[in-house]
């Protein structure tokens, strides 16, 4: 055996990200070092869950030992702490993959973006489920002995590392299945080698763990503690979500979240309910307080664990939450689904559809509640997850109105992009005679805020929503109205302010259009291949001209977005609108010699003002210089 063991011994290097993580973690998490135990117990519990699940199909995996539990022991002399479980265990390949790399994609990028200060932020580091590696906060050597359930005793694996760049693995004998982790404590960690200290940590962080966490009893004898040969269960050892709400404290909900959500931060909010009816299930759903770094990664893990009658079935049950709520974490425990339910079955199941719809409503209800009663929290939620929620407008037809009610947007009545308003706020402030919700889309807050299209709205004190996120184009293309009020782009179609304008204003506009007819015709000819139409507008007060998209054409902002994403877009020429009172426009009426240059500059500056790019910037510059010289000469 010794021979094969030596023969099998291999020394391997950690993946680069792990090395980085180990360094960062030891420093950033040190002040909260006790959490290593929570992480190891959490892993042990998951391993027991996985075994119970696999044993549903193959009872022999229990190997005559079906009482799943987690044990914690310590040895003062040897200065070691041991956490063991009789869960699923790991094969050699699994050990190398799980304890030598970080599986999450995108970690490398994430690390490279962290600034020095962020690296010290424990909660950022915590996002990785640094889990197992947190043992190195308190240990300078960690030994893992593990054997996968169902394998022979000689298929045990011993993994060891000092948390430097390398680890070793070798095959060893291990009679009991499962995993035993031994931490060789660093200097000055002696306080952890005390029964009551450990029990305190377990109760604080791991009380909710479903499996019993066993420790040997202690007794005080002659002024010191003596360990007895008798086990006691330290935690409550029952499924938290199955307990009545009034028996669960705030802290217990929070600690449970850290286990299911693999997060170090407290959750922002949660909802816990037992649903009766055609489908019976319990849901405990959490909103994290921070967006995970991979929220925009298509392969991001979803966060719902599915249980059937307390038996863990699967992680990452993406069928239980719509895509736009992919950040929600928690547990759904069904009383009705069969225990052998698979991902394939989930995809087609009507029962799952009912559960998903129930969970979606519950989360949206929780958000509505926050929005109404805790504006600060809701603002925090919106800052982290608003962009994801917006996807729901086009994705979840049944809940479109609810989601629309949860939207928050910047507006001309605010100074910063962060000060947002809801559509209901907007409606409650509408001017007398106003029956539409006005918005503008642009590729940045400043471009939206300073757009010439807003001039008449400013003058009349009419609020306009400023939409500057990419997903906003998607939102407005799916949201035609809210609360009976149509959403209208101020940069599309003709501007009809309806009752917001009086008769005199309308008359003035008509006569201006007549007076300018010759000019607009002439510009149309000059810019024939660039514009669809040239017309007089009353939307401008300070600018000479602006571009608008025709009613049913794509907005210029969307066209630019698609173009920059490399997509072919139908070419639709914009409408050039001119301000009949602007001196530049008036001057143009009498221009003969350089009319084409003037018209071209008018068009180009309108395009620049709305954040567009010129096809031929050099010609624009040449024309402007030419005109400047002529002006100077006068
Ligand atoms: P996470 O728990 O977030 O996946 P960890 O670094 O804590 O990250 O663990 C990595 C993986 O190692 C786990 O996903 C699991 O597959 C495996 N693992 C860790 N601890 C155990 C254990 N006690 N028994 C079986 N597998 C384990």
Image: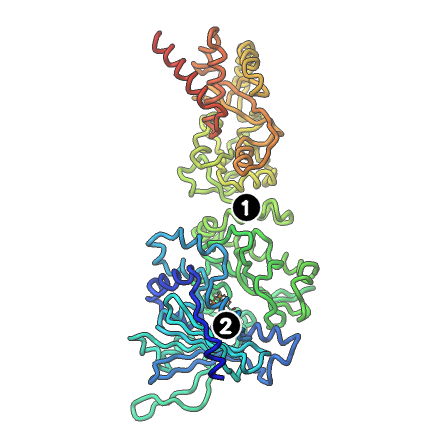
Compute the Cα span from label 2 to label 1. Answer: 36 Å
Identify the residue shown where x is 49% and y is 17%.
600
Of labels 2 and 1, the one closer to you: 1
Q: Is residue 228 above or below residue 382?
A: below
Query: Is 145 or 271 nearer to us in this picture?
Result: 145
Instruction: Say which quadrant the C terminus sits in.
Output: top left
- The answer to whether residue 152 is left or right of residue 11 is right
Question: Observer-nearest residue: 389 or 43?
Answer: 43
Q: In screen coordinates, is 6 left or right of 52?
A: left
Disc assigned to residue 247: 2
Q: Picture coordinates of residue 307 (x, y %)?
A: 60, 69
* Percent coordinates x, y for residue 334 in the rendering: 63, 67
Mark 2 touches mark 1? (CB < 8 Å) = no
- How many labels were placed on the picture? 2
The disc at residue 390 is 1
Residue at (34%, 58%) from the top-left corner?
Answer: 120
Give whichever of 46, 487 is nearer the camera. Answer: 46
């Amino acid at each position: 055996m010794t021979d094969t063991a030596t023969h099998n011994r291999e020394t391997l290097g950690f993946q680069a990200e792990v090395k980085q993580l180990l360094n960062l973690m030891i420093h950033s998490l040190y002040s909260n070092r006790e959490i290593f135990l929570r992480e190891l117990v959490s892993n042990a519990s998951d391993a027991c869950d996985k075994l119970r699940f696999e044993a549903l199909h193959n009872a022999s995996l229990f190997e005559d030992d079906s009482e799943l539990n987690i044990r914690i022991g310590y040895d003062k002399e040897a200065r070691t702490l041991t956490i063991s479980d009789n869960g699923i265990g790991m094969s050699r390949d699994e050990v190398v993959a799980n304890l030598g790399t970080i599986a999450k994609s995108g970690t490398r990028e994430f690390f490279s973006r962290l600034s020095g200060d962020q690296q010290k932020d424990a909660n950022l580091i915590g996002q990785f489920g640094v889990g197992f590696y947190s043992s190195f906060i308190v240990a300078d050597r960690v030994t893992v002995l593990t054997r996968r359930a169902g394998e022979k005793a000689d298929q045990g694996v011993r993994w060891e590392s000092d948390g430097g760049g390398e680890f070793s693995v070798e095959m060893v004998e291990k009679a009991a299945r499962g995993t035993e982790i031994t931490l060789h404590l660093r200097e000055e960690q002696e306080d952890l080698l005390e029964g009551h200290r450990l029990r305190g940590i377990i109760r604080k962080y791991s009380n909710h763990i479903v499996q019993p966490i066993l420790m040997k009893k202690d007794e005080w004898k002659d002024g010191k503690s003596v360990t007895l040969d008798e086990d006691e269960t330290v935690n409550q050892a029952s499924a938290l979500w199955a307990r009545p709400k009034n028996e669960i404290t705030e802290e217990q909900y929070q600690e449970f979240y850290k286990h299911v959500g693999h997060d170090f931060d407290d959750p922002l909010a949660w909802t816990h309910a037992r649903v009766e009816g055609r489908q019976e299930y319990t849901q405990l759903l959490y909103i994290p307080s921070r967006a995970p770094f991979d929220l925009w990664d298509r392969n991001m893990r979803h966060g719902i664990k599915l249980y059937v009658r307390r038996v863990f079935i699967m992680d990452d049950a993406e069928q239980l939450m719509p895509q736009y709520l992919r950040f929600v974490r928690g547990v759904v425990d069904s009383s009705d689904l069969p225990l052998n339910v698979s991902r394939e079955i989930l995809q087609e199941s009507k029962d799952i559809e009912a559960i998903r719809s129930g969970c979606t409503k519950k989360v949206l209800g929780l958000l509505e509640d926050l929005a109404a009663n805790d504006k600060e929290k809701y603002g925090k939620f919106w800052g982290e997850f608003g962009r994801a929620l917006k996807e729901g407008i086009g994705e979840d037809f049944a809940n479109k109105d609810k989601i629309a009610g949860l939207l928050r947007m910047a507006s001309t009545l605010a100074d910063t992009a962060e000060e947002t308003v809801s559509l209901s706020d907007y409606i409650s402030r509408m001017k007398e005679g106003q029956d539409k919700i006005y918005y503008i889309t642009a590729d940045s807050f400043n471009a939206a805020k300073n757009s010439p299209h807003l001039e008449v709205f400013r003058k009349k004190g009419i609020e306009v929503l400023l939409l500057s996120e990419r997903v906003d184009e998607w939102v407005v293309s799916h949201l035609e109205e809210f609360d009976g009020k149509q959403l209208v782009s101020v940069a599309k179609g003709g501007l009809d302010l309806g009752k917001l304008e009086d008769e005199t204003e309308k008359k003035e506009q008509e006569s201006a259009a007549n007076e300018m007819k010759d000019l607009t015709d002439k510009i149309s000819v000059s810019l024939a291949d660039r514009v669809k139409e040239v017309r007089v507008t009353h939307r401008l007060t300070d600018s000479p001209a602006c571009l608008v998209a025709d009613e049913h054409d794509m907005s210029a902002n969307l066209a630019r977005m698609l173009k920059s994403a490399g997509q072919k877009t139908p070419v639709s020429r914009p409408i050039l609108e001119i301000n009949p009172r602007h001196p530049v426009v008036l001057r143009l009426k009498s221009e003969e010699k350089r009319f084409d240059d003037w018209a071209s500059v008018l068009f180009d500056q309108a395009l620049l003002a709305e954040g567009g790019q010129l096809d031929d910037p050099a010609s624009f510059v040449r024309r402007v210089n030419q005109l400047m010289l002529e002006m100077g000469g006068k």
